[in-house]
């Protein structure tokens, strides 16, 4: 028991005994004790009333009291002071956070769990045209009504940002990135990416234009080289090796230009206009024949395919993606290797998988494989005529089909490249 409490109980017992002793003079010890207890009760009620009055005016100093009540008043007083100090610290911190968010050049918008606007900084006010008086508490989707934003907001898959033209000025591009926090609350970050997009477009146009301009001279060169090769016996002997090298290199350059043009097309063309139902079985069977030819029939290519499964997509793009995977599987594995192509579906989507039992790829390279011009082994890749663009093309094709590419590999065990398509692209024809 606490010492004050012990003292208080002792006091109660002593006073009750004293009351009983006084009452004993009049032959009524019980009444004497009861009278003392009543007096003590009145005293406690009085202190309780003082406490209640003080709690109604907590800014005043606490009432003077002794013993147990003194401890109670002091305890509450110290607790209040601590609370006040903590509150002040918290308010200062919130003010600082708000001030620093206000200073940000990117827009920051806090959205509550009901999807209503709660707070935003000045940059967001300018970029989104928000007004602090009328818009607070409004649903965000009433203010940003673009169907693509509404879809992005409702789908709750916020790994990637969304880029849209501003609803205030068409030529301004805004990047929206939502992050979930707390209890289903959201933080919306808005960035003006007009300049970045313009630069990206310039890069795309530059690559597309250069590749396009190189195509004609390269075709002319390749044509003449072919003509020279046809008459190689008429040329001096020491020219013949040079001719072979020139023919090889011009073929390589033509391949590079074609792949660069494919990548630019993937980045700029309209996907929806080109999408049709595709018989994947037919497509993969044709690519298998081409891969066998490429490998001089030295590989075993096994097909494990669901023939009833079609996909809604762009046939040229998928041909390019699947052939890149299958050609890589024969290019980067030794003769006699087994390549298995699977085409199947489950509850989450459909999958085209190309698996080989070749040398595999060291784990450290895996995350860079889809970057442009990335090659694991420069020497081996140029021997096989690789450009380092194949897997970048596959990645882009998959993104355009709302899917993604998964790569798994283990050295000396082989590699597996899996194209994952979402269910909304899968078609199963009615028989
Ligand atoms: P490339 O045009 O050079 O083939 P890719 O982008 O298609 O470029 O491939 C990138 C690199 O990934 C290749 O250089 C190769 O080293 C490696 N690679 C791709 N597929 C396989 C595979 N099936 N087995 C082993 N390595 C592979």
Image (tube, helix red, strand yellow):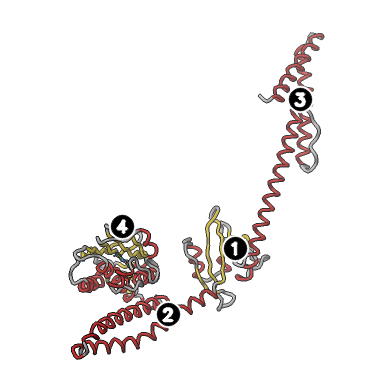
Q: Which residue is mark 1?
A: 109
- Looking at the rendering, which quadrant does residue 288 occupy? bottom left
Closer to us: mark 3 or mark 4?
Answer: 4
Q: Which residue is mark 3?
A: 41
Work out which residue is located at the far bottom of the displayed protein and give it. Answer: 234
> For the residues marked 2 and 4, what is the alpha-carbon distance in whole angstroms?
35 Å
Q: Residues within 10 Å of mark 3 (few under 14, many from 20)?
A: few
> For the residues marked 3 and 1, what is the alpha-carbon distance in whole angstroms?
58 Å
Is residue 51 shown above or below 428?
Answer: above
Q: Position of residue 241 (x, y in %)?
A: 24, 82
Q: Residue at x 66, y 68 (%)?
A: 131
> For the residues marked 3 and 4, what is the alpha-carbon distance in whole angstroms?
83 Å
Apparent side of residue 411 relative to residue 93 in the rendered image (left or right): left
Apparent side of residue 188 relative to residue 22 in the rendered image (left or right): left
Q: Which residue is mark 2?
A: 207
Is residue 193 shown above or below 71?
Answer: below
Apparent side of residue 318 relative to residue 102 in the rendered image (left or right): left
> For the residues marked 4 and 1, what is the alpha-carbon distance in whole angstroms?
45 Å
Q: Earlier in the sequence, mark 3 or mark 4?
A: 3
Q: Position of residue 420 (x, y in %)?
A: 35, 64
Q: Earlier in the sequence, mark 2 or mark 4?
A: 2
Ligand 1 rendered quadrant: bottom left
Q: Secondary structure at mark 3?
A: helix
Q: Earlier in the sequence, mark 4 or mark 1?
A: 1
Contact between marks 2 and 4 (CB within 8 A): the answer is no
> For the residues marked 1 and 2, what is the alpha-carbon distance in whole angstroms?
37 Å
What is the number of the mark on residue 410? 4
Q: Position of residue 360 (x, y in %)?
A: 29, 60
Quarter holding the C terminus?
bottom left
Closer to us: mark 4 or mark 1?
Answer: 4
């Amino acid at each position: 028991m606490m010492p004050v409490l012990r003292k208080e109980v002792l006091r109660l017992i002593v006073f009750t005994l004293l009351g009983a002793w006084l009452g004993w003079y009049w032959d009524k010890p019980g009444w004497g004790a009861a009278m003392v207890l009543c007096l003590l009760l009145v005293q406690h009620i009085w202190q309780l009333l003082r406490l209640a009055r003080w709690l109604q005016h907590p800014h005043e100093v606490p009432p003077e009291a002794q013993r147990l009540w003194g401890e109670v008043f002091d305890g509450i007083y110290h607790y209040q002071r601590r609370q006040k100090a903590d509150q002040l610290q918290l308010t200062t911190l919130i003010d600082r956070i708000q001030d620093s968010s206000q200073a940000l050049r990117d827009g920051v918008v806090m959205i509550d769990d009901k999807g209503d606007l709660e707070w935003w900084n000045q940059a967001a006010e300018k970029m989104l045209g928000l007004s602090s008086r009328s818009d607070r508490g409004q649903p965000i989707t009433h203010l940003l009504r673009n169907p693509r934003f509404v879809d992005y907001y409702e789908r709750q898959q916020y790994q990637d940002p969304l880029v849209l033209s501003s609803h205030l000025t068409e030529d301004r591009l805004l990047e929206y990135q939502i992050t979930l926090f707390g209890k289903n609350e959201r933080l919306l970050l808005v960035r003006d990416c007009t300049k970045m997009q313009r630069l990206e477009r310039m890069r795309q146009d530059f690559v597309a234009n250069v590749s396009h301009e190189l195509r004609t001279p390269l075709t002319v060169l390749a044509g003449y080289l072919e003509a020279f090769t046809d008459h190689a016996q008429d040329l001096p002997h020491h020219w013949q090796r040079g001719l072979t090298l020139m023919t090889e290199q011009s073929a390589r350059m033509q391949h590079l230009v074609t792949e660069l043009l494919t990548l630019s097309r993937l980045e700029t063309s309209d996907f929806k206009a080109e999408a049709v139902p595709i018989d994947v079985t037919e497509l993969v069977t044709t690519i298998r024949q081409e891969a066998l030819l490429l490998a001089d029939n030295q590989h075993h290519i096994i097909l494990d395919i669901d023939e009833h499964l079609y996909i809604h997509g762009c046939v040229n793009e998928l041909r390019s993606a699947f052939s890149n995977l299958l050609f890589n599987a024969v290019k980067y594995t030794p003769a006699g290797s087994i390549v298995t192509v699977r085409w199947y579906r489950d509850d989450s989507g459909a999958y085209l998988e190309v698996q080989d039992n070749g040398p595999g790829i060291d784990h450290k390279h895996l995350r860079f494989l889809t970057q442009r011009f990335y090659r694991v082994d420069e020497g081996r890749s140029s021997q096989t005529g690789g450009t380092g663009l194949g897997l970048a093309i596959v990645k882009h094709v998959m993104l355009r089909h709302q899917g993604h590419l998964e790569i798994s590999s283990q050295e000396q065990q082989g590699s597996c490249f899996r194209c994952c398509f979402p269910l909304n692209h899968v078609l199963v024809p009615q028989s």
